[in-house]
Image (cartoon, rainbow, N blue to C red):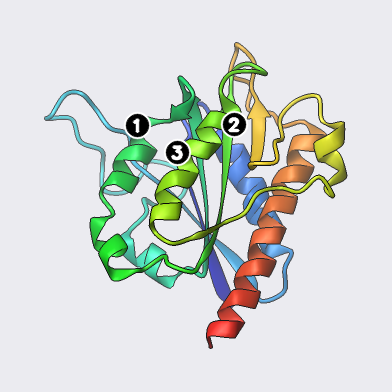
Amino acid sequence: MKEILVLYYSHRGSVRALAEQVALGIHQVPGAAARVRTVPKVSTVCEAVEDEIPASGPPYVEVRDLEECIGLAIGSPTRFGNMAAPMKYFLDGLAGPWVNGTLAGKPASVFTSTASQHGGQETTLLSMMLPLLHHGMLVMGLPYTEAALNRTRTGGTPYGASHVAGADGNPALSADEIELAIAQGRRLAETALTLAAGRA
């Protein structure tokens, strides 16, 4: 079984909900499995540290997760049109894997959640793509052959799956958001398996 790393940071649960659907799409592809991981919060207080193991949810990501995966999906909520600090902090610390080419040639996709319909989803997705391109990853989006992309009145972009949480931060995904997140996971897994077979 080949694993796709689904890596996310979620503050209020929306990005975690998307990650679960992306993982479901990965599991629908024979021969593929999702390895779900998260990143710890960051603090402006230098003495504040997170426990080594999260109180709930998936474990924190380690470099070996990047080494062992054949593909990567990363998700973050939007912070003023950019990814959240915990995800950026993790990506900024990957000089070793970058020098070693750990992620080069592997496919990747991105997903996000915002409070409002025009709250910076697409710029956040694009901001997450930039470090992946520097690592030599093959970045994938969602094509308009996915019917839900034309139909959705909530989240969903050609750059990646997304969710509109509203001002109250509701993590409940719409039917179209679920469909697109699953499709993204499935497409990523199919591509990753094809590329991995070519490298074998």
The answer for how far apart the CA atoms under marks 2 and 1 are is: 17 Å
Q: Are marks 2 and 3 in contact (CB under 8 Å)?
A: no
Point out residue 186 in the picture as x, y percentages from the top left corner. 71, 59
For mark 2, give the secondary structure. helix
**Quarter of the N terminus within the rendering:** bottom right
Say which of marks 2 and 1 sits in front.
2
Residue of label 1: 85
Q: Are marks 3 and 1 in contact (CB under 8 Å)?
A: no
For mark 3, give the secondary structure. loop
Looking at the image, is mark 2 or mark 1 earlier in the sequence?
1
Q: Nearer the viewer, residue 145 or 8?
A: 145
Task: Give the residue type that dot 1 points to.
Answer: Ala
Label 1: few (<14), some (14–19) or many (≥20) C-alpha neighbours in 10 Å: some
Whether residue 13 is visible here, answered yes or no, is: no
Task: Give the residue type that dot 3 points to.
Answer: Tyr
Question: Mark number for residue 9?
Answer: 3
